[in-house]
């Protein structure tokens, strides 16, 4: 019997979110003395040894490498169908996946195919009886926690993407590859994604080392000039709050928050942002938060490490000038 | 093009979130309610498609009697019809919710075989974030489905959307949709775009950013105020996932170190950036 975890690829590596999902799944497996197995859509003959070592390091004994000549790209229902077959083959008592777009989508299909509930965005999971799991799951993108009980076998769950740290096991052998060739129907293959070649230019908001954020306090679309300039000087990305995108001041792709992008920079400089929970859900992984705000009682101040009490339109141009003077004299 | 757009009423939370004493709900005594953000975009998208291709939009919610307020907001955006699946306020899980929505979808948009051409959902509700109602409805109806969509084109076969019109025989006349119509849906994937092509009828869940919902017009609001809302009462049923209690995560309050006031704080700010090794 196993706990089965969907593993997503990041090029020729295991995606970091999947290592975190494996960590939660391993905890669940250990709580009931079961083995941890991985399921990945990766032709068995081409799985690099490094991937099997990495999976082994996270406690995976068996890695099911799924291949079908009918499956050329990502097809959500086909992926779920393959997992449904692996539930039987691996005698899985639980199936987990990272709560990514793909992971969440595939698990929803698996829930619909099996008629079982899916517990989304779990931060902790342990077995209390053969068909019962005690869970903590995220609501409001992690601003609220839910203690929940899942009574279903197998237990289907997704792992909140930023809730669990990836922790390897002390001594481990490489995982063993087991090929799986799923039986797929026409309907399973009706929806299939193709990746476009174009990549977005500029500093990626999700991975930027520094993010300069702007909110209502920036005052309007024209107020972003100094923030752009500061971002240019720091090699930073510009992020904004939801009010800024819903006013149409900036494009939605710059939104940081529950309905936008999650960021995890070394520094988040939040300018004129009040700190609504919808926004904070997107930046709680920031290492340091500096808030610039006229209101010392704004909610953002209680999430920040440092604060400047003042108007963005005065503080940011002065900061830009100081940085320019510094680089000029250096 | 007949479109069903499903929305959820959620608490409007601002700077902090609190839980009721029994740990069962978000405390909404100091806040109002709103439509979950992704779903408001689903309604806007539905209205834009109907404006472009003809047809109409039915907006649906499952919630307490007061959820009629949110349906009226969506009628004001341009939906033509509203259905409220009325509950007694208890929280419904995604399996039961999908079953109740499926039943309404099966009844169709009216007429002899007037099923919906497109069912739009928000990707995930702001509060519960279950990410599965759309997919479960699609399976129950035997329709193709894709989620997390940031751009949606409808290709009716006569190329009405300025797409490449590869849909075959074309729509069924003025309403668009019907035989051969397809949807081309795009979403973000690891810094690139992932494209899905699916035949209609189909189920699509969208994310905020697919459009910018309009500010409702005054005539729209007046019409919405007077509009009739169809009410039904589906039966609640429990499912395998059971909420025990809600709680606010601990240890998130910090005391920020104040670097200064106004432009006078800039030297301290520069020093901080320097100490963090973030200056070029």
Image: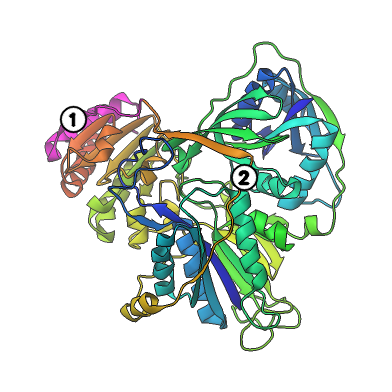
Name the residue carrying label 1. B259
Residue sitting at x 40%, y 70%: B72
Disc 1 + disc 2, Cβ < 8 Å: no
Along the horizontal axis of the image, is A178 left or right of B99?
Answer: right
Q: Residue A159, image x and y in percent?
A: 58, 35
Which residues, given as a range, are shown in magenta?
Answer: B251-280
Label 1 and label 2: CA atoms lie apart by 42 Å
Classify mark 1: residues with Cα within 10 Å, few (<14), some (14-19) or many (20+). Answer: many
Q: Nearer the viewer, residue A242 or B101?
A: B101
Circle number at residue A104:
2
Residue A284 picture quarter: top left
Along the horizontal axis of the image, is A42 left or right of A274?
Answer: right
Please give the chain letter of the residue carrying mark 2: A
Residue sitting at x 34%, y 75%: B221
The reply to the same-chain question for discs 1 and 2 is: no
Residue A30 picture quarter: top right
Q: Residue A97, image x and y in percent?
A: 65, 37
Please give the chain letter of the residue carrying mark 1: B
Q: Nearer the viewer, residue B280 or B19?
A: B19
Q: Residue A232, image x and y in percent?
A: 35, 45
Along the horizontal axis of the image, is A46 left or right of A220?
Answer: right
Residue sitting at x 65%, y 43%: A117
């Amino acid at each position: 019997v196993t706990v089965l975890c969907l593993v997503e690829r990041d090029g020729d590596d295991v995606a970091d979110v999947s290592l975190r999902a494996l960590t939660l799944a391993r905890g669940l497996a250990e709580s009931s003395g079961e083995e941890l197995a991985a399921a990945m859509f990766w032709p068995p003959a081409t799985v690099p040894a490094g991937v099997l070592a990495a999976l082994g390091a996270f406690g995976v004994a068996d890695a099911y490498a799924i291949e079908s000549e009918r499956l050329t790209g990502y097809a959500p229902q086909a992926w779920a169908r393959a997992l449904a077959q692996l539930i039987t083959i691996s005698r899985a008592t639980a199936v987990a996946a990272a709560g990514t777009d793909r992971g969440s989508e595939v698990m929803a299909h698996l829930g619909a195919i099996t008629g079982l509930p899916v517990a989304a965005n779990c931060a902790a999971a342990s077995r209390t009886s053969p068909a019962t799991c005690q869970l903590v799951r995220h609501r409001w993108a992690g601003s609220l926690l839910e203690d929940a009980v899942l009574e279903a076998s197998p237990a289907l769950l997704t792992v909140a993407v930023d809730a669990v740290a990836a922790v390897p096991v002390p001594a481990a052998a490489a995982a063993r590859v087991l090929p799986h060739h799923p039986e797929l129907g026409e309907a399973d293959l009706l929806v299939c994604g193709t990746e476009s070649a174009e990549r977005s230019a500029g500093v990626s908001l999700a991975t930027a080392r520094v993010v300069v954020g702007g909110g209502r306090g920036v005052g309007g679309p024209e107020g972003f000039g100094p923030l752009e300039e500061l971002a240019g000087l720091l090699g930073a990305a510009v992020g904004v709050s939801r009010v800024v995108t819903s006013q149409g001041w900036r494009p939605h792709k710059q939104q940081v928050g529950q309905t936008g992008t999650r960021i995890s920079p070394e520094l988040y400089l939040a300018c004129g942002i009040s700190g609504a929970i919808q926004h904070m859900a997107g930046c709680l992984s920031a290492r340091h938060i500096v808030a610039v705000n006229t209101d010392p009682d704004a909610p953002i101040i209680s999430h920040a490490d440092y604060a400047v009490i003042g108007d963005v339109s005065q503080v940011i141009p002065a900061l830009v000038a100081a940085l320019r003077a510094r680089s000029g004299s250096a | 093009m007949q479109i069903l757009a499903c929305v959820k009423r959620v608490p409007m939370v601002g700077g902090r979130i609190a839980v009721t004493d029994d740990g069962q709900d978000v405390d909404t005594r100091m806040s109002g309610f709103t439509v979950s953000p992704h779903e408001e975009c689903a309604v806007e998208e539905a209205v834009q498609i109907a404006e472009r291709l003809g047809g109409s939009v039915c907006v649906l919610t499952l919630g307490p009697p007061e959820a009629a307020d949110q349906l009226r907001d969506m009628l004001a955006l341009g939906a033509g019809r509203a259905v409220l699946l009325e509950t007694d306020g208890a929280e419904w899980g995604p399996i039961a919710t999908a079953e109740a929505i499926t039943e309404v979808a099966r009844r169709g948009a009216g007429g002899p075989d007037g099923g919906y051409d497109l069912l739009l959902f928000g990707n995930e509700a702001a509060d519960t974030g279950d990410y599965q109602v759309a997919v479960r409805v699609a399976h129950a109806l035997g329709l193709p489905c894709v989620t997390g969509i940031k751009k949606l084109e409808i290709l009716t076969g006569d190329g009405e959307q300025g797409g490449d019109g590869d849909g075959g025989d074309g729509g069924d006349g003025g309403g668009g949709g019907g035989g051969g119509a397809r949807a081309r849906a795009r979403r973000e994937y690891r810094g690139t775009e992932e494209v899905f092509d699916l035949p209609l009828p189909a189920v699509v869940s969208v994310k905020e950013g697919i459009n910018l919902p309009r500010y409702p017009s005054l005539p729209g609001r007046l019409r919405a105020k007077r509009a009739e809302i169809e009410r039904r009462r589906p039966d609640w049923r429990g499912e395998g996932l059971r909420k025990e209690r809600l709680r606010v995560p601990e240890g998130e309050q910090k005391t920020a170190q104040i670097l200064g006031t106004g432009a006078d704080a800039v030297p301290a700010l520069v020093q901080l950036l320097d100490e963090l090794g973030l200056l070029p």
